[in-house]
Image: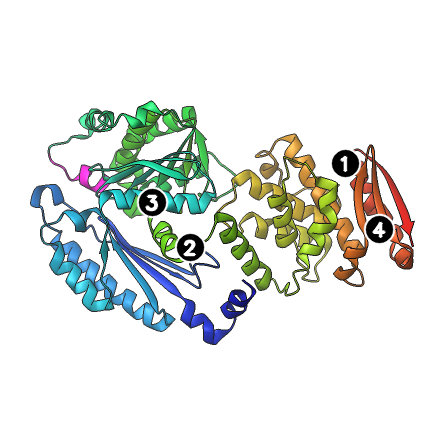
Amino acid sequence: MQTEIIKLFKSEEKTKTKQAIIDLGSNSIRMLIYDDFKLNPIPLFNEKAVCKLGKNLDKSKKLNADGCVSALKVLNRFKEILEVSEVRNLQIVATAALREADDAKPFLDKVEEIFNTEPRVLTGEEEAETAANGVILGFGNIDGIVADLGGGSLELTRVSNNTIYEKISLPLGVLRLMNNPIIKKKNLPKYIRNILKDHKWLIEKKLKNLYVVGGTWRALLKNHIYQDDYPLHIIHQYRLNRYTAVKYLNKISKLNKSSLKPLEPITKSRTQFLPYSSIILNELIEIVDPKYVICSISGLREGHMDFIYNRDRTKIDILNSHIDTIVFQKGDFGKSYLKYFNFIKPAFDGNEIFNDKLLNLSCVLSKMDWGLGAFQKAELVFNEVLNTPILQLSHQERVMIALASFWRHCSLKYNPNYKYLGLLTNNQIINSKRVGAALRLSESLTSLSSLLLDEFKIYKRRQTLYLKVPRVHMDIVSKQVTKKFNALAKIMELESSIIYSQ
Protein backbone atom coordinates (compact mmCIF):
# COMPACT_ATOMS: atom_id res chain seq x y z
CA MET A 1 0.00 0.00 0.00
CA GLN A 2 2.85 2.37 0.79
CA THR A 3 4.16 1.98 -2.79
CA GLU A 4 0.74 2.79 -4.26
CA ILE A 5 0.45 5.96 -2.18
CA ILE A 6 3.89 7.15 -3.26
CA LYS A 7 3.02 6.53 -6.91
CA LEU A 8 -0.13 8.59 -6.57
CA PHE A 9 1.87 11.69 -5.70
CA LYS A 10 4.61 11.31 -8.30
CA SER A 11 3.51 13.31 -11.34
CA GLU A 12 4.94 10.85 -13.86
CA GLU A 13 3.07 7.93 -12.33
CA LYS A 14 -0.10 9.93 -11.64
CA THR A 15 -1.06 10.20 -15.31
CA LYS A 16 -0.71 6.44 -15.72
CA THR A 17 -3.12 5.60 -12.92
CA LYS A 18 -5.97 7.95 -13.87
CA GLN A 19 -9.22 6.21 -14.77
CA ALA A 20 -12.50 7.39 -16.23
CA ILE A 21 -16.00 6.07 -16.76
CA ILE A 22 -18.71 7.29 -19.14
CA ASP A 23 -22.31 6.36 -18.37
CA LEU A 24 -24.63 6.45 -21.39
CA GLY A 25 -28.01 6.80 -19.70
CA SER A 26 -31.50 7.14 -21.13
CA ASN A 27 -31.84 10.74 -19.94
CA SER A 28 -28.28 11.95 -19.36
CA ILE A 29 -24.67 11.17 -20.16
CA ARG A 30 -22.05 11.55 -17.44
CA MET A 31 -18.28 11.24 -17.24
CA LEU A 32 -16.19 10.82 -14.08
CA ILE A 33 -12.39 10.91 -13.87
CA TYR A 34 -10.47 9.45 -10.92
CA ASP A 35 -6.87 9.99 -9.86
CA ASP A 36 -6.76 6.36 -8.80
CA PHE A 37 -10.03 4.63 -7.96
CA LYS A 38 -8.29 2.04 -5.76
CA LEU A 39 -6.93 4.77 -3.50
CA ASN A 40 -9.82 7.23 -3.58
CA PRO A 41 -13.31 6.54 -5.03
CA ILE A 42 -14.11 10.28 -5.14
CA PRO A 43 -13.82 11.70 -8.70
CA LEU A 44 -11.69 14.74 -9.46
CA PHE A 45 -13.93 15.47 -12.48
CA ASN A 46 -17.69 14.90 -12.69
CA GLU A 47 -19.84 16.31 -15.48
CA LYS A 48 -23.21 15.42 -16.95
CA ALA A 49 -25.22 16.48 -19.97
CA VAL A 50 -28.96 15.89 -20.46
CA CYS A 51 -29.39 14.41 -23.96
CA LYS A 52 -32.60 12.35 -23.60
CA LEU A 53 -31.53 9.42 -25.78
CA GLY A 54 -34.54 7.47 -24.51
CA LYS A 55 -37.22 10.08 -25.19
CA ASN A 56 -40.34 8.45 -26.75
CA LEU A 57 -38.55 5.09 -26.85
CA ASP A 58 -41.70 3.12 -26.01
CA LYS A 59 -43.51 4.64 -28.97
CA SER A 60 -40.77 4.66 -31.64
CA LYS A 61 -38.52 1.79 -30.49
CA LYS A 62 -35.66 4.03 -31.61
CA LEU A 63 -33.24 6.45 -30.00
CA ASN A 64 -34.25 10.09 -30.01
CA ALA A 65 -32.57 11.62 -33.11
CA ASP A 66 -31.95 15.02 -31.50
CA GLY A 67 -30.63 13.26 -28.42
CA CYS A 68 -28.13 11.31 -30.52
CA VAL A 69 -26.81 14.51 -32.11
CA SER A 70 -26.43 16.16 -28.70
CA ALA A 71 -24.85 13.07 -27.20
CA LEU A 72 -22.18 12.77 -29.90
CA LYS A 73 -21.25 16.44 -29.45
CA VAL A 74 -20.91 15.89 -25.72
CA LEU A 75 -18.87 12.72 -26.20
CA ASN A 76 -16.45 14.45 -28.56
CA ARG A 77 -15.95 17.10 -25.90
CA PHE A 78 -15.42 14.38 -23.29
CA LYS A 79 -12.74 12.90 -25.56
CA GLU A 80 -10.86 16.21 -25.55
CA ILE A 81 -11.03 16.33 -21.75
CA LEU A 82 -9.69 12.78 -21.51
CA GLU A 83 -6.78 13.64 -23.79
CA VAL A 84 -5.89 16.76 -21.82
CA SER A 85 -6.16 14.81 -18.56
CA GLU A 86 -4.02 12.01 -19.99
CA VAL A 87 -6.44 9.31 -18.90
CA ARG A 88 -5.33 5.89 -20.08
CA ASN A 89 -8.05 3.65 -18.64
CA LEU A 90 -11.62 4.28 -19.83
CA GLN A 91 -14.80 2.35 -19.12
CA ILE A 92 -18.04 3.02 -21.03
CA VAL A 93 -21.35 1.57 -19.82
CA ALA A 94 -24.79 1.91 -21.38
CA THR A 95 -28.21 1.25 -19.84
CA ALA A 96 -31.93 0.98 -20.69
CA ALA A 97 -32.26 3.08 -23.87
CA LEU A 98 -29.28 1.45 -25.56
CA ARG A 99 -30.29 -2.09 -24.67
CA GLU A 100 -33.84 -1.59 -25.94
CA ALA A 101 -33.62 0.66 -29.02
CA ASP A 102 -33.71 -1.10 -32.40
CA ASP A 103 -31.14 1.35 -33.77
CA ALA A 104 -28.71 1.26 -30.82
CA LYS A 105 -25.86 -0.44 -32.72
CA PRO A 106 -25.04 2.44 -35.15
CA PHE A 107 -24.87 4.85 -32.23
CA LEU A 108 -22.71 2.49 -30.16
CA ASP A 109 -20.40 2.01 -33.14
CA LYS A 110 -19.89 5.79 -33.32
CA VAL A 111 -19.12 5.88 -29.61
CA GLU A 112 -16.55 3.12 -30.05
CA GLU A 113 -15.01 5.03 -32.96
CA ILE A 114 -14.64 8.21 -30.87
CA PHE A 115 -12.96 6.55 -27.89
CA ASN A 116 -11.50 3.39 -29.42
CA THR A 117 -13.28 1.61 -26.59
CA GLU A 118 -16.28 -0.70 -26.91
CA PRO A 119 -19.22 0.36 -24.73
CA ARG A 120 -20.62 -2.32 -22.48
CA VAL A 121 -24.41 -2.50 -22.67
CA LEU A 122 -25.64 -3.80 -19.32
CA THR A 123 -28.59 -6.13 -19.02
CA GLY A 124 -31.31 -5.06 -16.60
CA GLU A 125 -30.10 -7.49 -13.93
CA GLU A 126 -26.48 -6.43 -14.42
CA GLU A 127 -27.52 -2.82 -13.99
CA ALA A 128 -29.39 -3.65 -10.77
CA GLU A 129 -26.44 -5.61 -9.35
CA THR A 130 -23.90 -2.95 -10.34
CA ALA A 131 -25.93 -0.15 -8.74
CA ALA A 132 -26.29 -2.19 -5.54
CA ASN A 133 -22.55 -2.82 -5.50
CA GLY A 134 -22.00 0.95 -5.73
CA VAL A 135 -24.22 1.50 -2.69
CA ILE A 136 -22.33 -1.17 -0.74
CA LEU A 137 -19.08 0.64 -1.61
CA GLY A 138 -20.53 3.96 -0.40
CA PHE A 139 -21.83 2.62 2.92
CA GLY A 140 -19.49 -0.23 3.83
CA ASN A 141 -22.38 -2.45 4.91
CA ILE A 142 -26.04 -2.36 3.89
CA ASP A 143 -29.28 -4.24 4.51
CA GLY A 144 -32.40 -3.41 2.55
CA ILE A 145 -33.68 -2.64 -0.92
CA VAL A 146 -31.52 -0.66 -3.36
CA ALA A 147 -33.63 1.31 -5.84
CA ASP A 148 -31.87 2.96 -8.81
CA LEU A 149 -34.14 5.29 -10.79
CA GLY A 150 -32.96 6.27 -14.26
CA GLY A 151 -34.57 7.81 -17.28
CA GLY A 152 -35.55 4.50 -18.85
CA SER A 153 -35.83 2.01 -16.01
CA LEU A 154 -36.02 1.34 -12.28
CA GLU A 155 -33.64 -1.29 -10.90
CA LEU A 156 -34.44 -2.99 -7.58
CA THR A 157 -32.11 -5.24 -5.61
CA ARG A 158 -32.49 -6.90 -2.22
CA VAL A 159 -29.28 -6.85 -0.20
CA SER A 160 -28.72 -8.42 3.20
CA ASN A 161 -25.39 -8.01 4.99
CA ASN A 162 -23.80 -6.96 1.69
CA THR A 163 -25.01 -10.10 -0.11
CA ILE A 164 -27.15 -9.50 -3.19
CA TYR A 165 -30.21 -11.70 -3.51
CA GLU A 166 -33.17 -10.83 -5.78
CA LYS A 167 -32.74 -8.23 -8.52
CA ILE A 168 -35.00 -6.87 -11.23
CA SER A 169 -35.16 -4.12 -13.85
CA LEU A 170 -38.58 -2.54 -14.45
CA PRO A 171 -39.81 -0.17 -17.22
CA LEU A 172 -40.47 2.60 -14.69
CA GLY A 173 -37.86 5.18 -15.69
CA VAL A 174 -38.97 8.75 -15.08
CA LEU A 175 -38.34 9.92 -18.68
CA ARG A 176 -40.17 6.88 -20.04
CA LEU A 177 -43.23 7.49 -17.86
CA MET A 178 -43.40 11.22 -18.59
CA ASN A 179 -43.34 10.61 -22.35
CA ASN A 180 -45.78 7.71 -22.38
CA PRO A 181 -48.99 9.04 -24.01
CA ILE A 182 -51.12 6.26 -22.54
CA ILE A 183 -50.18 6.77 -18.87
CA LYS A 184 -51.61 9.94 -17.34
CA LYS A 185 -50.20 11.37 -14.13
CA LYS A 186 -53.43 10.72 -12.20
CA ASN A 187 -53.30 7.02 -13.13
CA LEU A 188 -49.57 6.67 -12.50
CA PRO A 189 -49.76 5.41 -8.86
CA LYS A 190 -52.02 2.52 -9.82
CA TYR A 191 -49.87 1.67 -12.86
CA ILE A 192 -46.69 1.55 -10.74
CA ARG A 193 -48.40 -0.36 -7.94
CA ASN A 194 -49.57 -3.11 -10.29
CA ILE A 195 -46.06 -3.62 -11.67
CA LEU A 196 -44.42 -3.69 -8.24
CA LYS A 197 -46.97 -6.14 -6.81
CA ASP A 198 -45.90 -8.77 -9.34
CA HIS A 199 -42.60 -9.14 -7.48
CA LYS A 200 -43.48 -10.79 -4.18
CA TRP A 201 -39.96 -10.60 -2.74
CA LEU A 202 -40.42 -6.84 -2.37
CA ILE A 203 -43.19 -7.51 0.13
CA GLU A 204 -42.13 -10.76 1.81
CA LYS A 205 -38.93 -9.52 3.48
CA LYS A 206 -39.53 -6.49 5.67
CA LEU A 207 -36.19 -4.71 5.63
CA LYS A 208 -35.23 -1.61 7.55
CA ASN A 209 -33.80 0.55 4.76
CA LEU A 210 -34.65 1.69 1.25
CA TYR A 211 -31.52 3.05 -0.44
CA VAL A 212 -32.36 5.40 -3.31
CA VAL A 213 -29.94 6.04 -6.18
CA GLY A 214 -30.15 8.23 -9.28
CA GLY A 215 -29.96 11.92 -10.14
CA THR A 216 -33.67 12.67 -9.87
CA TRP A 217 -34.04 11.12 -6.43
CA ARG A 218 -30.87 12.90 -5.30
CA ALA A 219 -32.44 16.18 -6.45
CA LEU A 220 -35.65 15.29 -4.61
CA LEU A 221 -33.87 14.75 -1.30
CA LYS A 222 -31.54 17.70 -1.85
CA ASN A 223 -34.62 19.89 -2.03
CA HIS A 224 -35.82 18.44 1.28
CA ILE A 225 -32.49 19.33 2.91
CA TYR A 226 -33.04 22.99 1.97
CA GLN A 227 -36.74 23.08 2.78
CA ASP A 228 -36.16 21.48 6.17
CA ASP A 229 -33.22 23.81 6.93
CA TYR A 230 -31.10 20.76 7.67
CA PRO A 231 -27.64 21.98 8.75
CA LEU A 232 -25.46 19.47 6.89
CA HIS A 233 -25.67 20.05 3.13
CA ILE A 234 -24.41 16.58 2.22
CA ILE A 235 -26.83 14.41 0.27
CA HIS A 236 -24.92 11.12 0.66
CA GLN A 237 -26.36 9.09 3.56
CA TYR A 238 -29.08 11.71 4.13
CA ARG A 239 -32.08 9.84 5.48
CA LEU A 240 -35.77 10.37 6.19
CA ASN A 241 -38.03 8.22 8.30
CA ARG A 242 -41.01 6.69 6.53
CA TYR A 243 -43.58 9.16 7.84
CA THR A 244 -41.53 12.25 6.92
CA ALA A 245 -40.72 10.86 3.48
CA VAL A 246 -44.35 10.08 2.58
CA LYS A 247 -45.57 13.47 3.80
CA TYR A 248 -42.91 15.25 1.70
CA LEU A 249 -43.47 13.07 -1.39
CA ASN A 250 -47.23 13.67 -1.31
CA LYS A 251 -46.55 17.41 -1.35
CA ILE A 252 -44.05 17.30 -4.25
CA SER A 253 -46.17 14.93 -6.35
CA LYS A 254 -48.93 17.56 -6.52
CA LEU A 255 -46.70 20.35 -7.86
CA ASN A 256 -47.15 21.60 -11.42
CA LYS A 257 -44.76 23.32 -13.83
CA SER A 258 -45.22 26.81 -12.37
CA SER A 259 -44.95 25.72 -8.72
CA LEU A 260 -41.71 23.83 -9.49
CA LYS A 261 -39.89 27.01 -10.55
CA PRO A 262 -39.06 28.25 -7.00
CA LEU A 263 -37.04 25.09 -6.19
CA GLU A 264 -33.74 26.98 -6.26
CA PRO A 265 -31.27 24.26 -5.20
CA ILE A 266 -32.43 21.97 -8.02
CA THR A 267 -31.15 22.27 -11.58
CA LYS A 268 -33.81 23.02 -14.18
CA SER A 269 -33.12 19.76 -16.02
CA ARG A 270 -34.25 17.83 -12.91
CA THR A 271 -37.22 19.85 -11.62
CA GLN A 272 -39.67 18.64 -14.27
CA PHE A 273 -39.14 15.05 -13.12
CA LEU A 274 -39.65 15.63 -9.38
CA PRO A 275 -43.45 15.01 -9.25
CA TYR A 276 -43.14 11.75 -11.21
CA SER A 277 -40.14 10.57 -9.20
CA SER A 278 -42.11 11.37 -6.00
CA ILE A 279 -44.98 9.17 -7.11
CA ILE A 280 -42.62 6.30 -8.00
CA LEU A 281 -40.87 6.53 -4.63
CA ASN A 282 -44.14 6.83 -2.72
CA GLU A 283 -45.49 3.63 -4.28
CA LEU A 284 -42.21 1.85 -3.63
CA ILE A 285 -42.33 2.88 0.04
CA GLU A 286 -45.91 1.60 0.27
CA ILE A 287 -44.81 -1.81 -1.06
CA VAL A 288 -41.46 -2.20 0.73
CA ASP A 289 -42.52 -0.49 3.99
CA PRO A 290 -39.03 0.60 5.09
CA LYS A 291 -38.26 2.39 8.33
CA TYR A 292 -35.85 4.77 6.57
CA VAL A 293 -35.30 6.13 3.07
CA ILE A 294 -31.56 6.79 2.60
CA CYS A 295 -29.87 8.58 -0.29
CA SER A 296 -26.71 7.30 -1.95
CA ILE A 297 -24.51 9.23 -4.38
CA SER A 298 -22.60 6.02 -5.00
CA GLY A 299 -24.32 3.80 -7.53
CA LEU A 300 -23.95 2.32 -11.00
CA ARG A 301 -20.70 4.06 -12.04
CA GLU A 302 -18.96 3.49 -8.71
CA GLY A 303 -20.24 -0.08 -8.61
CA HIS A 304 -18.84 -0.81 -12.06
CA MET A 305 -15.45 0.68 -11.20
CA ASP A 306 -15.44 -1.27 -7.93
CA PHE A 307 -16.02 -4.56 -9.77
CA ILE A 308 -12.99 -3.82 -11.94
CA TYR A 309 -10.47 -2.24 -9.57
CA ASN A 310 -11.41 -3.65 -6.15
CA ARG A 311 -12.25 -7.20 -7.09
CA ASP A 312 -9.94 -8.84 -4.54
CA ARG A 313 -10.14 -6.21 -1.80
CA THR A 314 -12.34 -6.00 1.29
CA LYS A 315 -14.35 -2.89 2.19
CA ILE A 316 -11.97 -2.33 5.12
CA ASP A 317 -8.99 -2.43 2.72
CA ILE A 318 -10.71 0.14 0.51
CA LEU A 319 -11.39 2.48 3.45
CA ASN A 320 -7.81 2.11 4.71
CA SER A 321 -6.46 2.97 1.26
CA HIS A 322 -8.54 6.14 1.29
CA ILE A 323 -7.31 7.01 4.77
CA ASP A 324 -3.67 6.48 3.71
CA THR A 325 -4.25 8.82 0.75
CA ILE A 326 -5.68 11.54 3.02
CA VAL A 327 -2.78 11.11 5.45
CA PHE A 328 -0.26 11.56 2.65
CA GLN A 329 -2.09 14.62 1.33
CA LYS A 330 -1.94 16.18 4.81
CA GLY A 331 1.82 15.72 4.87
CA ASP A 332 1.78 13.10 7.64
CA PHE A 333 4.45 11.06 5.88
CA GLY A 334 5.47 9.24 9.06
CA LYS A 335 1.86 8.38 9.95
CA SER A 336 2.11 10.15 13.29
CA TYR A 337 -1.69 9.84 13.57
CA LEU A 338 -1.07 6.21 14.60
CA LYS A 339 0.93 7.48 17.57
CA TYR A 340 -2.07 9.53 18.68
CA PHE A 341 -4.46 6.63 18.11
CA ASN A 342 -2.35 4.16 20.08
CA PHE A 343 -1.92 6.67 22.91
CA ILE A 344 -5.60 7.56 23.43
CA LYS A 345 -7.16 4.20 22.53
CA PRO A 346 -6.84 2.62 26.04
CA ALA A 347 -8.98 5.44 27.43
CA PHE A 348 -11.80 4.50 25.00
CA ASP A 349 -11.65 0.70 24.96
CA GLY A 350 -15.16 -0.72 24.76
CA ASN A 351 -16.71 2.62 23.81
CA GLU A 352 -19.53 1.67 21.44
CA ILE A 353 -20.56 5.27 20.74
CA PHE A 354 -17.11 6.40 19.59
CA ASN A 355 -15.68 3.17 18.16
CA ASP A 356 -12.17 2.48 16.84
CA LYS A 357 -13.09 3.50 13.29
CA LEU A 358 -14.23 6.96 14.40
CA LEU A 359 -11.33 7.27 16.85
CA ASN A 360 -8.86 6.47 14.09
CA LEU A 361 -10.46 8.95 11.67
CA SER A 362 -10.44 11.66 14.35
CA CYS A 363 -6.67 11.23 14.68
CA VAL A 364 -6.28 11.32 10.88
CA LEU A 365 -8.52 14.24 10.02
CA SER A 366 -8.13 16.61 12.95
CA LYS A 367 -4.47 17.48 12.45
CA MET A 368 -4.10 21.04 11.19
CA ASP A 369 -1.63 23.81 11.92
CA TRP A 370 -2.01 27.00 9.89
CA GLY A 371 -0.52 29.38 12.43
CA LEU A 372 -3.97 30.69 13.32
CA GLY A 373 -5.57 31.40 16.66
CA ALA A 374 -7.00 28.38 18.47
CA PHE A 375 -10.67 29.15 17.82
CA GLN A 376 -10.08 30.08 14.15
CA LYS A 377 -8.18 26.85 13.67
CA ALA A 378 -10.90 24.89 15.42
CA GLU A 379 -13.64 26.30 13.18
CA LEU A 380 -11.65 25.64 10.02
CA VAL A 381 -10.82 22.07 10.91
CA PHE A 382 -14.46 21.48 11.98
CA ASN A 383 -15.77 22.49 8.56
CA GLU A 384 -13.05 20.62 6.71
CA VAL A 385 -13.75 17.39 8.58
CA LEU A 386 -17.51 17.83 8.29
CA ASN A 387 -17.22 17.84 4.49
CA THR A 388 -14.43 15.30 4.16
CA PRO A 389 -14.88 13.19 0.99
CA ILE A 390 -15.21 9.80 2.66
CA LEU A 391 -18.31 7.93 1.52
CA GLN A 392 -18.60 5.43 4.37
CA LEU A 393 -19.57 7.98 7.02
CA SER A 394 -23.10 8.62 8.22
CA HIS A 395 -24.10 12.21 8.97
CA GLN A 396 -23.92 11.59 12.71
CA GLU A 397 -20.44 10.08 12.37
CA ARG A 398 -19.28 13.11 10.38
CA VAL A 399 -20.47 15.49 13.06
CA MET A 400 -18.93 13.42 15.87
CA ILE A 401 -15.50 13.35 14.21
CA ALA A 402 -15.77 17.05 13.34
CA LEU A 403 -16.62 17.91 16.96
CA ALA A 404 -13.70 15.86 18.31
CA SER A 405 -11.46 17.68 15.82
CA PHE A 406 -12.88 21.04 16.92
CA TRP A 407 -12.14 20.37 20.59
CA ARG A 408 -8.65 19.14 19.75
CA HIS A 409 -7.81 22.74 18.87
CA CYS A 410 -9.66 24.73 21.54
CA SER A 411 -11.02 24.51 25.06
CA LEU A 412 -14.17 22.51 25.84
CA LYS A 413 -15.86 25.73 26.95
CA TYR A 414 -16.25 26.72 23.27
CA ASN A 415 -18.75 25.23 20.82
CA PRO A 416 -19.14 25.26 17.04
CA ASN A 417 -22.44 26.22 15.43
CA TYR A 418 -25.18 24.79 17.67
CA LYS A 419 -27.33 23.65 14.73
CA TYR A 420 -24.93 20.72 14.19
CA LEU A 421 -25.20 19.60 17.80
CA GLY A 422 -28.90 19.02 17.22
CA LEU A 423 -28.05 16.06 14.96
CA LEU A 424 -26.51 14.13 17.87
CA THR A 425 -27.64 12.69 21.18
CA ASN A 426 -26.19 14.04 24.42
CA ASN A 427 -24.09 10.87 24.77
CA GLN A 428 -22.59 11.35 21.29
CA ILE A 429 -21.71 14.98 22.08
CA ILE A 430 -20.10 14.06 25.41
CA ASN A 431 -18.04 11.29 23.82
CA SER A 432 -16.92 13.66 21.07
CA LYS A 433 -15.77 16.06 23.78
CA ARG A 434 -13.85 13.27 25.46
CA VAL A 435 -12.03 12.32 22.27
CA GLY A 436 -11.30 15.99 21.54
CA ALA A 437 -9.90 16.47 25.04
CA ALA A 438 -7.74 13.35 24.66
CA LEU A 439 -6.33 14.62 21.37
CA ARG A 440 -5.72 18.01 22.95
CA LEU A 441 -3.77 16.37 25.74
CA SER A 442 -1.80 14.32 23.17
CA GLU A 443 -0.90 17.50 21.31
CA SER A 444 0.45 19.11 24.47
CA LEU A 445 2.67 16.08 25.12
CA THR A 446 4.29 16.26 21.67
CA SER A 447 6.00 19.62 22.10
CA LEU A 448 9.27 17.95 21.10
CA SER A 449 8.08 15.15 18.81
CA SER A 450 5.10 12.83 18.32
CA LEU A 451 7.59 9.99 18.71
CA LEU A 452 7.46 10.63 22.46
CA LEU A 453 3.83 9.48 22.60
CA ASP A 454 5.16 5.91 22.46
CA GLU A 455 6.71 6.51 25.86
CA PHE A 456 3.60 7.91 27.57
CA LYS A 457 0.65 5.80 28.65
CA ILE A 458 -2.92 6.72 29.44
CA TYR A 459 -5.34 4.22 30.96
CA LYS A 460 -8.35 3.79 33.24
CA ARG A 461 -8.49 1.86 36.52
CA ARG A 462 -11.81 1.85 38.34
CA GLN A 463 -12.73 5.51 38.81
CA THR A 464 -9.34 7.02 37.98
CA LEU A 465 -7.68 8.07 34.75
CA TYR A 466 -3.90 7.66 34.88
CA LEU A 467 -1.18 9.36 32.86
CA LYS A 468 2.08 7.41 33.12
CA VAL A 469 5.17 9.49 32.31
CA PRO A 470 8.82 8.34 32.15
CA ARG A 471 10.76 10.26 34.79
CA VAL A 472 13.26 11.33 32.11
CA HIS A 473 10.45 13.32 30.46
CA MET A 474 8.86 14.76 33.57
CA ASP A 475 9.76 18.33 32.46
CA ILE A 476 7.23 17.98 29.64
CA VAL A 477 4.41 17.77 32.20
CA SER A 478 3.88 21.52 32.39
CA LYS A 479 0.95 23.38 33.93
CA GLN A 480 -0.75 23.30 30.52
CA VAL A 481 -0.33 19.52 30.22
CA THR A 482 -1.68 19.03 33.76
CA LYS A 483 -4.62 21.34 33.04
CA LYS A 484 -5.54 19.45 29.84
CA PHE A 485 -5.19 16.07 31.55
CA ASN A 486 -7.47 17.20 34.37
CA ALA A 487 -9.98 18.51 31.81
CA LEU A 488 -10.00 15.11 30.10
CA ALA A 489 -10.51 13.26 33.39
CA LYS A 490 -13.32 15.63 34.35
CA ILE A 491 -15.26 15.22 31.09
CA MET A 492 -14.82 11.42 31.47
CA GLU A 493 -16.18 11.73 35.04
CA LEU A 494 -13.02 10.23 36.52
CA GLU A 495 -10.38 11.25 39.07
CA SER A 496 -6.97 12.13 37.60
CA SER A 497 -3.56 10.88 38.60
CA ILE A 498 -0.13 11.43 37.02
CA ILE A 499 2.48 8.80 37.89
CA TYR A 500 6.17 8.80 37.04
CA SER A 501 8.13 5.71 36.14
CA GLN A 502 11.82 4.92 35.75
Instruction: Write down the residue under mark 2.
Output: 310
Instruction: Write down the residue under mark 4.
Output: 481
- The number of discs equals 4
Front tag of 4 and 2: 2
Relative to 367, is 26 on the left or the right? Answer: left
Residue 100, label in figure: none
Label 1 or label 3, whichever comes before in sequence order: 3
Q: Amino acid at mark 1?
A: Met
Q: Nearer the viewer, residue 485 or 228?
A: 485
Is disc 3 placed on a helix, strand or loop? helix
Relative to 440, is 211 on the left or the right? Answer: left
Give the image's coloring scheme: rainbow
Residue 94, x across and y down, in percent: 23, 53
Label 2 or label 3, whichever comes before in sequence order: 3
Front tag of 2 and 3: 2
Q: Residues within 10 Å of mark 1 (few under 14, many from 20)?
A: many
Relative to 98, is 425 on the left or the right? Answer: right
Residue 141, x across and y down, in percent: 47, 40
Instruction: Write down the residue under mark 1.
Output: 492
Q: CA distance from mark 1 to mark 4?
A: 17 Å
Q: Residues within 10 Å of mark 4 (few under 14, many from 20)?
A: some
* Residue 176 in magenta stretch: yes
> Predominant secondary structure in magenta?
helix
Q: Is residue 338 above or below residue 278?
A: below
Q: Which residues are magenta?
A: 174-181
